[in-house]
Image: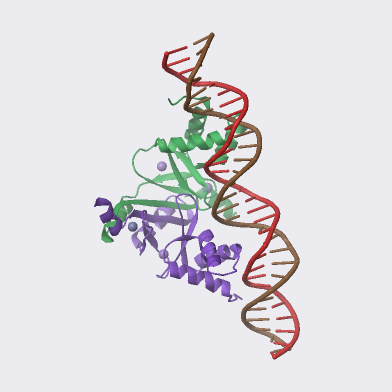
Chain colours: A purple, B green, C brown, D red
Amino acid sequence: MKRNTWQREAVKTALSERGDFVSAQRLHADLKQAGSTIGLATVYRTLTDLVSADEADALQSPDGENLYRACSSEGHHHHLICRNCGHTEEISAEAVEAWAATVAAEHGFTQPRHVVDVFGLCATCSAATSA
Amino acid sequence: MKRNTWQREAVKTALSERGDFVSAQRLHADLKQAGSTIGLATVYRTLTDLVSADEADALQSPDGENLYRACSSEGHHHHLICRNCGHTEEISAEAVEAWAATVAAEHGFTQPRHVVDVFGLCATCSAATSA
DNA sequence: TCCTTATTGATAATGATTGTCAATATGGAT
DNA sequence: ATCCATATTGACAATCATTATCAATAAGGA
Ligand SMILES: [Mn+2]
Ligand SMILES: [Mn+2]
Ligand SMILES: [Zn+2]
Ligand SMILES: [Zn+2]
């Protein structure tokens, strides 16, 4: 009984068009800027739903803000993020997935979740920095 | 001109005795519980300082709270954390280190850093939950 | 002991996120 | 097409961790 609303579509579209990680606050501000009357709470709810449905990925910025991104690849995966320009590339990490599950089990931990992100300087920013 | 205060010592001691990751809020509550008159702002300031001085490790819990821990081991390592009671076990992950470096290089990223933490329910909390 | 000023802590302010709830809109049933 | 039960929305308040203020205090060199 999941209903289709223009609000949900608006969030999905805005997220896809952007490509990089965005905060709920900023996405809402941009939507309003473009003339939308969508509410902030709805943006939060929709983003949370998208993450649950594996249609978007979330991560925490160093200052604690939650950032969201429309994922092109299906299923669980991780990210390689440029800490200078924010450019993001999706990466699979099967070896790490297995490792996380194994190490949790070995220590008697259940319901394991893992946070795996790689931050660095992308090729472009690396070149600019060394120049 | 860094001055030594009993407040700073109290935080360092409390953090060391605990061993696991704690939030500033909880550490402050425990200190007060034990009779200390230390202020909350001071706990926050001291923890931030300890991290800067590499005397403590910090990480973000899944719900966005900042957690701190007095680290015994010097080198780079990761953690297996109970998201219910905060119990922490240090884990080494050589395979993950290598993987992170490799995947970064493959995408042209330089100066790679990684965030790798596993959250779950420890054996004790798992038993309590299922009971 | 004196004095400069780093440090403290009660309190207010900030800011992201979540809860509330009456009004609205969706989609299946009639 | 019309009804209707209820999922969804959005303005607003509430929560909660963290930070900023700033007057009072105390560390430690002179
Ligand atoms: Mn992704
Ligand atoms: Mn550690
Ligand atoms: Zn870049
Ligand atoms: Zn536990």
Q: How many marks?
A: 0
In front of the other: A118 or B83? A118
Is residue A96 visible to the viewer in this orientation of the structure? yes
Percent across and percent down for residue C18 are: 61, 57
User: Looking at this view, is C10 or A71 the one in front?
Assistant: C10
Query: Left or right of B80: which side holds B36?
Result: right
Q: Dividing the picture into quarters, in which one does residue A7 lie? A: bottom right
Closer to the camera in the image, C19 or C12: C12
Regarding residue B71, the answer to whether it shows in the image is no
Q: Position of residue A1 (x, y in %)?
A: 61, 76
Residue nearer the viewer, C28 or B40: B40
x then y, percent, for residue A130: 25, 51
Residue at image location 45% in from the left, 35% down from the top: B49
Which quadrant of the picture is home to ligand 3?
bottom left
Furthest residue to the left?
Answer: A131
**Residue D5, quarter of the rendered image:** bottom right
Which quadrant holds residue B2? top left
Residue B127: image x %, image y %? 55, 51
In the rendered view, would you say A111 is above or below A11?
above
> Which residue is depicted at the point 52% across and 48% down?
B65
Q: Is residue B99 left or right of residue D29?
A: left
B71 over A54 or under it: above or below: above
